[in-house]
Image (cartoon, rainbow, N blue to C red):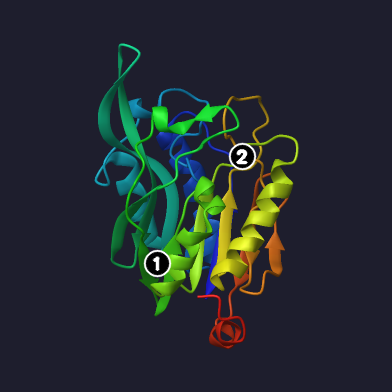
Amino acid sequence: MRIALLQITTNADKMANFEHLRQAAEYAAKKGARVLVFPEATSQAFGTGRLDKQAENLDGEFATAVRELASELGVVIVAGMFVPADTVEKEGKKIDRVHNTALITGAGLHQGYRKIHTYDAFGYRESDTVKPGEELMLFEVDGVSFGVAICYDIRFPEQFKQLAREGAQIIVVPTSWQDGPGKVEQWQVLSRARALDSTTWIAACDQARPQEERKGPTGAGHSVVVDPTGKVVAEAGYEEETLIVDIDLSELEKVRNSIPVL
């Protein structure tokens, strides 16, 4: 299974971000990648304005454009976007919350995973504007079972273990990781630990580090592919970069039999 991690930086306008996605996807498809993983918040980067203003359902402009592109290229695309959720009141103000969603589209698929664990840490409160999801999600491409998680989910091993119990062989993790002292090191440890916890392949795609200063989790690069033994197979740097990796699943059951943590 050839996959691509497309570590890009997105901005405020979702259709401008789609054009960036399109160019990166065309390159990866030409290289033979079958599943293309983009970062969390591909449709609109954190720190670039209210998410509810451009949020859309899975039949919206951005999601439809990605679906048509995936069909045209003959690939499956996983990309972060925001879907309208609910309205809550806080401190006398009404807030239109969204679901932080990983769109999965192509090869007859068109569905969205809603991020379960909102990023309420390091002084940031994602749950103020994002409603948590409740359901795990798996999808299948060419007989290979994929699980899905988003960013902060990677700090919760039980989610990854349960995805593996339900059949996931590869878990894709669109991410927009908060930069700062020690954060890249935490990301590297967590991605390897989740591979070991679940004995699955981890394919985690982060936003590249933006050139301008933004508030919130806006990306620190270092997208990574980790095998079920915790070995890093490929890792990006801080800048925009595409990783194309051939994942060999032939040894997966052998690993799970030798390390029966599930």
Does 32 sit above or below residue 80? below
Q: Could you tell me which residue is drawn at 47 percent across and 65 percent down?
A: 35
- The numbered mark, 2 or 1, whose residue comes first in the sequence reads 1
Q: At which x and y percent is residue 162? A: 43, 66
Position of 161 compared to 81: left or right? right
Few, some or many C-alpha atoms within 10 Å of disc 2 (few <14, some 14-19, many ≥20)? many
Residue holding disc 2:
219
Q: How many marks?
A: 2
Residue holding disc 1:
74
Does 137 sit above or below residue 112? below
Q: Could you tell me which residue is drawn at 60 percent across and 42 percent down?
A: 177
The reply to whether dot 2 and dot 1 touch (C-beta < 8 Å) is no
Q: Could you tell me which residue is drawn at 40 percent across and 27 percent down?
A: 128
Position of 170 compared to 105: left or right? right
Closest to the observer: 216 or 89?
89
* Residue 20 numbered tag: none
Does 110 sit above or below residue 20? below
Q: Is residue 39 visible?
A: no
Q: Quadrant of residue 87?
A: top left
Disc 2 element: loop
Q: Could you tell me which residue is drawn at 47 percent across and 40 percent down?
A: 41
Closest to the observer: 165 or 138?
165
Closest to the observer: 85 or 242?
85
Say which amino acid is labelled 2.
Answer: Gly
Q: At which x and y percent is residue 106? A: 35, 62
In front: label 2 or label 1: 2
